[in-house]
Image (spheres, grey):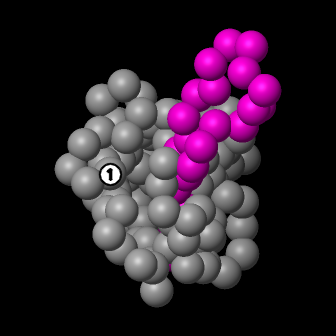
Amino acid sequence: MRSCTRGGIAAGILWLAGCGGPHEASVSGTVTLDGQPLVGAHVTFQPASTGAAAYGRSLHDGSYEIFTGRAGGLTPGEYLVAVTATTIPEPGAAETIGELLTPEHYGDPQRSGLRFTVARGRNRIDLPLRTADAGP
């Protein structure tokens, strides 16, 4: 009986430490548009089959990190990726939505041409977007 308790405690500690949890992978990288950092881009990792989508937003230097809900990371597997970025409307402007900066096809994970395999552990996935790309 004691060994079962010790095994249960060890399993609980590993679970709390993040080993074997649902988000066994992390993804970070840089989003660029025509070689320049893309600020404020919304990055979506949509599972190719089933599962929860994961999201991130690029910072001032184009760097991003992916989260599933409020938890960092995602489940390893195949992902289709979408990226969108818009201008920020001036305060008091009639428009409430900015102008799209990224080519439209990048906003659709099925048409973006961005597909990646996320492995366990840390993954660096840079997203070099181009305005000249006509899309798949």
- Measuring 64% from the left and 37% from the top, which residue is drawn there? 98
Front residue of 18/73: it is 73
Question: Any magenta on residue 79?
Answer: yes
- Measuring 34% from the left and 37% from the top, which residue is drawn there? 62
Front residue of 36/120: it is 36
Q: Residue furthest left?
A: 35
Work out whether residue 53 can be spotted.
yes
Measured as percent of width and height from the top left, residue 8 is found at: 67, 44
Q: Main secondary structure of the magenta part?
A: loop
According to the image, label 1 marks what residue? 33
Provide the secondary structure element on which disc 1 rests: strand
Residue span colored magenta: 72-100
> Toward which corner of the image does residue 36 lie, by quadrant?
top left
Up/down of 18 relative to 111, above or below: above
Q: Residue furthest top?
A: 91
Three-letter code, disc 1: Leu
Up/down of 94 relative to 91, above or below: below
Measured as percent of width and height from the top left, residue 38 is found at: 37, 40
- Measuring 58% from the left and 28% from the top, which residue is drawn there? 88
Up/down of 21 relative to 90, above or below: below
Say few, some or many: other residues with alpha carbon within 10 Å of mark 1 (under 14 / 14 to 19 / 20 or more): some
Q: Report whether 69 appears left or right of 24.
A: right
Measured as percent of width and height from the top left, residue 19 is found at: 50, 46
- Measuring 21% from the left and 50% from the top, which residue is drawn there? 35
> Toward which corner of the image does residue 99 lie, by quadrant?
top right
Work out whether residue 19 can be spotted.
no
Question: Any magenta on residue 94?
Answer: yes
Measured as percent of width and height from the top left, residue 116 is found at: 41, 72
Up/down of 51 relative to 17, above or below: below
